[in-house]
Every structure is written in structure tokens, then in C-alpha cells.
Image (spheres, grey):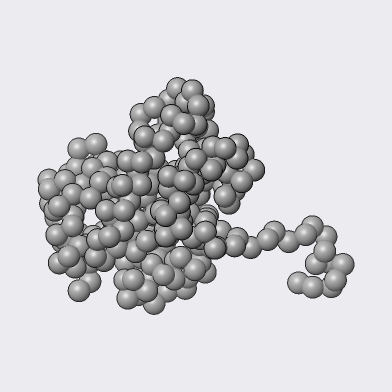
């Protein structure tokens, strides 16, 4: 069954905006343009294609928009998984992905955003210490796991999205049964902007005190191993000046 709605869900600071843009670019590549979608007239508090919470009334509005357009509508959210959405996933008229990130890197990005006045979840003052992020991250992990356990949901992770976008575009296309140019979709998504706060893989290795890193790993180790692509190796940047000297292009 071809879904009517694609929900792009991500944990806080997980590269979820780029993941959503990958979905949009895949759909554009498949001739299922999203440029005319604007949720604001029907969903209170929506920001064009972002929905804060997808409850029965928001979902009904999304379905109305998709049915009127006659093709899939992709939306971004940080909402928990409501039963109405779960039923749509089970019935096949909703598809989704869920984006995870190592909680240690989430904590660092949350602190960055708060210092810059871009607090996640309404918080704008700096955290007193990285330990203060732990309750929020626990809630984020629990929310992600509910999404990832649902049918018709593709689990994604920060590093492959940020540093291997073409491969993730191909996975999204395969999930939807679409044939697209994954490289072109990735380029389009990246050209639209990434919103990556620092954009560094596994930044906790350089920026987090070992004792804190070990404490987070002790609590979230199974989550990291299962969902956060710990074995993904981002491509190394080319050494400046090496290719011209070797006569390579």
C-alpha cells in the first residue's frame, strides 16, 4: 500500500531537519512534489510542514490534505507516537522514519543551542552542567524507541545522515518502493541547508570529559549500540593539495 503520509521523526539535535529534507528530495525525484504543501491553514501551531504534536485532530487534517492532493505528504515532527499514528502505521497508510543520535552528542548540542539562545523544547538559558540534559535525553530515548518499534518505520542515525546522505536517501526510496537518483536527492537536500549545529561525527570523543562520557555510556550503552550506527565511518576529507600533485581528478 502506498502511504498517504510520511512522518519524519527525530530525537532532539539528531540531524532530523536534514533527514526530513532527504525525504522531501526523494519524493521530488519521484515526481511527488512537496512544494505546494502548507499545513498552517488546517493545523494550529504548524510551521508549513512541521507539526509539533500529531494527535487525532492533526492526523485527520494531514489525511485530508494528502487525499486532496492525491499523493503522499511528508511532515516533520518531534511528537511522541500517538495511538492514532500507530494504527496508521499498522494499516500502511502512514510510513515514517525515526532518527537517533548518541546521547553524549545530543547533550553537547543541546548545551550549544541553549548558549546561543536556541534552546530545544523552549529552554534558552545555558545548562548549568551537562548532567542537566540527562532527564530530557532519557525522555527522548524512550520516545525514539517507541517509534522505532512500530511497523513501517525506518530507523536512521545521525552519522550516516550527516556524512553519508546519498546512502540514506537510497534507503528511504527503497522503503517507499521508489526509484530515484539517490546522489541527486542527497545533493538537493544538502543544498537546502543542514541545520547541523557543529556537524562533527562523534564529537563527544574530543569535547566531553571521559568521566561524563563513561557515565552516559553506562546508562545508554545498549541504545547506542543498537540504534546509533557506532560502526559507521565517515569518509575522510581529502588532503589539501594531494590530488593535483598526483595528477588525479
Give x and y (percent) for residue 113: 49, 33
The furthest residue to the right: 245
Residue 209: image quadrant is top right
Residue 156: image quadrant is bottom left
Residue 198 shows in the view:
no
Quarter of the image that includes the N terminus: bottom left
Residue 247 shows in the view:
yes
Q: Residue at x 26, y 66 (%)?
A: 152
User: Viewer-proximal residue, 112 or 202?
Assistant: 202
Q: Residue at x 25, y 46 (%)?
A: 80
Give x and y (percent) for residue 82: 18, 49
User: Viewer-proximal residue, 100 or 122?
Assistant: 100
**136 versus 248 height, above or below:** above
Quarter of the image that includes the C terminus: bottom right
User: Viewer-proximal residue, 210 or 165?
Assistant: 210
Residue 206: image quadrant is top right
Q: Residue at x 83, y 60 (%)?
A: 241
Give x and y (percent) for residue 52: 27, 41
Q: Please state if 84 lies on the left or on the right of 217 as rendered.
A: left
Q: Residue at x 34, y 64 (%)?
A: 154
User: Viewer-proximal residue, 101 or 62?
Assistant: 101
Give x and y (percent) for residue 135: 36, 34
Q: Please state if 197 lies on the left or on the right of 88 as rendered.
A: right
Amino acid at each position: 500500500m502506498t502511504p498517504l503520509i510520511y512522518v519524519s521523526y527525530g530525537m532532539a539535535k539528531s540531524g532530523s531537519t536534514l533527514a526530513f529534507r532527504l525525504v522531501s528530495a526523494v519524493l521530488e525525484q519521484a515526481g511527488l512534489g512537496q512544494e505546494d504543501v502548507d499545513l498552517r491553514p488546517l493545523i494550529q501551531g504548524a510551521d508549513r510542514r512541521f507539526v509539533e504534536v500529531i494527535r487525532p485532530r492533526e492526523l485527520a487534517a494531514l489525511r485530508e490534505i494528502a487525499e486532496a492532493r492525491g499523493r503522499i505528504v511528508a511532515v516533520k515532527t518531534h511528537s511522541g507516537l500517538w495511538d492514532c499514528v500507530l494504527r496508521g502505521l499498522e494499516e500502511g497508510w502512514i510510513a515514517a522514519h525515526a532518527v537517533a543520535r548518541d546521547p553524549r552528542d545530543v547533550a553537547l548540542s543541546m548545551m550549544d543551542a541553549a548558549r546561543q539562545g536556541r534552546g530545544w523544547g523552549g529552554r534558552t538559558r545555558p545548562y548549568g552542567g551537562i548532567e542537566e540534559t540527562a532527564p530530557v535525553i532519557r525522555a527522548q530515548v524512550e520516545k525514539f524507541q517507541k517509534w522505532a518499534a512500530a511497523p513501517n518505520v525506518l530507523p536512521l542515525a545521525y552519522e550516516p545522515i550527516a556524512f553519508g546522505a546519498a546512502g540514506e536517501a537510497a534507503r528511504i526510496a527503497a522503503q517507499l518502493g521508489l526509484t530515484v537518483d539517490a546522489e541527486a536527492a542527497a545533493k538537493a537536500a544538502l543544498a537546502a541547508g543542514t541545520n547541523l549545529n557543529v556537524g562533527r561525527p562523534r564529537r563527544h570523543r574530543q569535547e566531553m570529559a571521559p568521566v561524563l562520557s563513561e557515565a552516559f555510556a553506562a546508562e545508554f550503552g545498549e541504545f547506542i549500540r543498537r540504534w546509533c550506527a557506532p560502526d559507521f565511518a565517515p569518509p575522510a576529507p581529502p588532503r589539501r593539495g594531494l590530488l593535483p600533485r598526483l595528477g588525479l581528478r
